[in-house]
Every structure is written in structure tokens, then in C-alpha cells.
Image (spheres, rainbow, N blue to C red):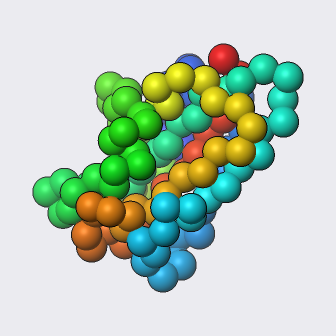
Amino acid sequence: AVWVDLPDELRGGTQVLTPSRSPPSASWDYVRLMLTSSAPSYVYVLRDTRGCPPHGTLPLWLTSGFDQVEGEVARAEGPGGGSQFEVYRSKKPLEGVVRLGSNSAYPSRGARYNFAVILQPA
């Protein structure tokens, strides 16, 4: 992905992109990452604002394990513009197996857009 105005704290991180055209899923185990570095990492979730309130409720996995970071980033999508993404950071550095739910996981309803993940060593 080509990110516009990416904050310094996210630059150089490892990116994981979820499929943007996949059918909606209500899974709590939508993305599974195995963090194998010697140090724990902060997990940043970049969530497409088209799937956020007022269009729906945020999923519990996101509101319980992550804090929203001030500001938004944009993803360039070619002619016609791009999408805005809210940024969330894990409340603490994580290690081992990290499971992230989908945008439509409880109690979210109707969220059809996916998200990106950026990993940064703590």
C-alpha cells in the first residue's frame, strides 16, 4: 500500500494487508500473526473509516485491546482518490501469536471494509 502522511512512529514497520475485496467476516480470529522477533512489538491497526461510526460500531477486539492514536492516514488508490484510515495501537507490546478479529466481529454491524496492520518493535 502507498500511505500518505504516515506518522514517523509507523515508518519502517512491517506491513500486513488484509484483502480489500474479501466478503465480510464476523470472525474473532480473522488475522493470525506469529511475532518471532526477540523483542515484543506494538501492533498498529489502520482501519478504513468507511467501516467506522456513524456507519457501524467498532468491534470489541479493537476497543478492548487497542487505543486510538490521534490523526488519520490516507492510502492512495490511484485515479479518483483514496481512503482515510484511523490508527489504533495495541495497549501494550505483544509477542507470540496475535489474533485480530474482522471489522464485522461483535458488536460491529455492517462494516464491509478491511484494515492494515503495521508492526513496530517496542
Residue 13 picture quarter: top right
Q: How far across and how far down the image is residue 40, in percent?
A: 71, 24
| Residue 50 visible in the displayed image | no
- Tell which of 88 and 39 is nearer to you: 39
Residue projecting furthest to the left: 54
Q: What's the residue at 43%, 36% (across, down)? A: 65
Residue 95 picture quarter: top right
Q: What's the residue at 59%, 69% (across, down)? A: 19
Quarter placement of the C terminus? top right
Position of residue 3 in the picture relative to residue 110 (left or right): right
Q: Is residue 15 above or below residue 25?
A: above
Residue projecting furthest to the bottom: 23
Q: How many marks?
A: 0
Q: Is residue 106 above or below residue 70?
A: below
Q: Is residue 58 above or below residue 27?
A: above
Q: How far across and how far down the image is residue 91, in percent?
A: 46, 26
Position of residue 104 in the picture relative to residue 95 (left or right): left
Position of residue 86 in the picture relative to residue 27 (left or right): left
- Tell which of 36 and 69 is nearer to you: 36
| Residue 97 visible in the displayed image | yes
- Tell which of 114 and 73 is nearer to you: 114
Q: Is residue 117 above or below residue 83?
A: above
Q: How far across and how far down the image is residue 80, in percent?
A: 39, 66
Q: What's the residue at 56%, 62% (across, down)? A: 29
- Tell which of 115 and 59 is nearer to you: 59
Position of residue 83 in the picture relative to residue 96 (left or right): left
Q: How far across and how far down the image is residue 120, in percent?
A: 66, 27
